[in-house]
Amino acid sequence: MDLIHPRTVADVAEALGTASRVGIRVLVVGGRRHLDKGNPTEVDVEIWTTQLDQVVAYEPDEMLVVVQGGMRCGTLAELLAEHGQEWPADAPPDATVGGVIASGATSARRLRVGALRDTVVEMELVTGDGRTVHSGARTVKNVTGYDLHRLMTGSLGTLGVITQVALKLRPLPERRRTLVAVGDMALARRIAAEVPLVAGVLGTHDGLEVRLEGWSDEIEELGAAVVRLAGDAVPSDDDATFPLAPWWTWPEGGTVLEAAVVPSSLPEILAGSTIYAALAGVGIAWVGAADADEVAAVRRRVEAIGGIAPAVRGPGGLGGTLPVPAVHRRLKASFDPSNVLAPGRIWT
Amino acid sequence: MADVDAARRELEAALGPEAVLSDPLARRLYARDASMVEGACALVALPTTPEQVQACVRAAATHGLPIVPRGSGTGLAGAATPIGDSLVVTTARMTGILEVRPEDRLAWVEPGVPNLDLANHLRAMGWSYAPDPSSQQTSSIGGNVNTNAGGPHCLAYGVTSAHVLALDVVMADGSIERLGAEGPEAAGYDLRGVVVGSEGTLGLVTRVCVRILPAPPAVRTMLFGFDTVEACAATVSAIIARGVVPAAVEMMDQGIVRAVETFAHAGYPVDAAAVLLVEVDGNAAGVAAQTHEVEASADANGASSVRVASDETERALLWKGRKSAFGAIAQIAPHYHLHDCVVPRTKVVEVMRGVYAIAERHGLIVTNVFHAGDGNLHPLFSFDRAVPGTLERVLQASDEVVRLCVDAGGALSGEHGIGLEKRDFMPLVFSAEDLASQACVRAAFDPDGRMNPRKVLPDGARCGEFALAAAGTGDAASDAADLPEGSWI
């Protein structure tokens, strides 16, 4: 596998311009944390974004940071923490900002922090044929033209390379606490519904983890509310991290599916699975599947209620069907006219 | 060539004769939205079902009419102002709240339902819909989706795009597609995300699946007066620096406070140079902690007056002052022109000073009421159109305000959109390549250019052809000649 390791945006543009002219197929690679997501694709060369790792602008007062796409999430988190802020991606430290955005990753705290796609307010990207384009603005509100950054988020590197983004930040909470409780998804759902502003309720086969974040008094108030519902909820020590994406620590092998369904249907799609981690109130469940048959079985349950279940680790591809394939094809043809960016990764 | 009569007959057959308007009065009524631009249309259709909307799109395609989608017509940028022989399709009769599912944190609504109707419906059930544009009494959810509307409470909760899970859309080819999903993620590119804020240029929204949130158990609303605009703005920064993101932070200058006070009698301090309305919400302990931080921030910056709403009635009164601002300014002069630029929060004071200077130079009255927390300024020029030369001065001043905001690193619009009014400013913030790429997105949805043509993008912006037009070989100049008067502001 040939490798391109650009130092500047101009390098990226030149590389993709050339690739498009001569028909070299390219995989965009950040921290290699989300490469399994997507349908199988054959490429000739990898473009590594990891040298595009600079902070372009950071004014804590604006609660926005502008960074290059290859910046590592851990480096960014450290910088922001110095100013009491965070970008709530909850990605592993070696993942890149661009990779997390391109893969459409979900934070385990989504119930409180929302969808990652809503934190991206401006983007610079290089299209498959080497054009450098920007969209959005460095403001938290903006209705100015079409939001190309929306299309890029979750596009798995099939439309362009994310070279720079402006991200909306949050203040770090004064305190956080994770409570461990015994219970099932029904209890998880009650906690998510009845404890105001709970950051996350993660249900597994073995029990529940409940994440609380906020002001000191608030943590006590919310903790008491959880105990009222769950009985014996044991606080872990206050600095313990909530599982970022729990499947990262699961044993290798098999497939991990990221199911997305309406929240009330989580119990239905988890029936029969023993390896799972589900976000109550959100409708995301990471489900372990040992082989292709198990993948198919989970997908049958998920798709029967209108959800999707792409594989995020191991074989299995995206599954599901595209809405409006004609629009998808025309978008791909506009941004990557020679079809060099990970051909077939989203559809064939 | 458009065949208006044939289109009318086809629409009357599909929608019923009472749902198709073509008389001169109706065409005049629908010839504009709440912007300053007046256009013209050939036909107005008032469908009640998605199938009837499909019939509209098909009839327009068959008979060569452009389509202009319209919600309540409260848009301020001219996106719903029709041009030429258009078919205006209004969702005014599609006002149903179809389904509310708290267990899935979603509700399905028809596009014509007014924002406030949905908010009130949900409130009675203990739930909320966060975006609350000042027009919420009238403006529709479909219109909010198309302008990616904001409102005071989007500081903490995010704008409309964060609250739309799925859209049923009649595409330009007449098919109905579901973009997005009821669940948290959908397959493929985020088409839902680009349709939100697309000002009716990518398709016609027939159903909206909105994200609903539990109503916060505790809320506190505070009003602070300051002797200087600088102290008021510094308080906003101080609040953020203390790690508080209030539900809303609204700033009003003295001109608007005085207008509001004689109108709403909300007890605003009329001697203050600026007032700050701050609302925090959450659970009881969180609200107490945030209130403490907010009060300390105001105190540290020398607030000259402090008022904390003691009950729901007082809270409603404080908000009444803010929300009646645009009604109150009618006392100043019969017409107004409202701006909507966003600047970095740290540039708010500098830009306000610049706006005051521009107004003074052109002899105009300007007042400011805006979303200080997210830097979304709403300078408002009050004037009387009947006075010769006034409109020209307003237009010149408006041009300068837009350039001032862009120079400060801002965007052209925070929540009203581009429409006709600001499309020719787009090259101030986007390169030819950027605009060409945006034109490609539009062409991917609507290859024939039938949906709300001439809006959002300047005439020269074409997918793959922009370089040509920019080089002076395109027909942008002749295109611009037939736009209605005033559409360049």
Image: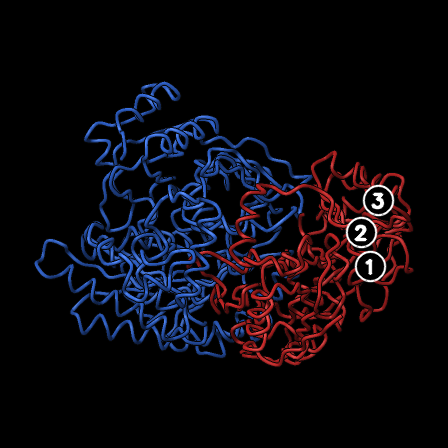
Chain colours: A red, B blue
- Outermost residue toward the front in this view: A22
Kind of residue indicated by mark 2 = Trp
Q: Which residue does the numbered mark 2 point to in the structure image?
A: A286
Q: Does residue B157 show up?
A: yes
Tell which circle, 3 or 2, labels the residue nearer the N-terminal end. Answer: 2
Please state, as top left, top right, bottom left or bottom right, where the N terminus of chain A lies in the image.
bottom right
**Mark 1 Cα-neighbour bin, 10 Å: few <14, some 14–19, many ≥20:** some
Q: Chain of mark 1?
A: A
User: Label 3: which residue?
Assistant: A295
| 3 or 1: mark nearer the eye | 3
Which of marks 1 and 3 precedes in the sequence?
Answer: 1
User: What is the residue that sits farthest to the left in this orientation?
Assistant: B388
Dot label at residue A246? 1
Q: Position of residue A95 (x, y in %)?
A: 73, 70
Residue B437: x, y in percent?
46, 59
Residue B297's disc number: none
Give me the C-alpha separation between circle 3 and circle 2. 12 Å
Q: Name the subunit of mark 3.
A: A
Pointers 1 and 2 in contact (C-beta within 8 Å) = yes
Task: Tell me the SS state at disc 1.
Answer: helix
Q: Is residue B27 above or below residue B183?
A: above
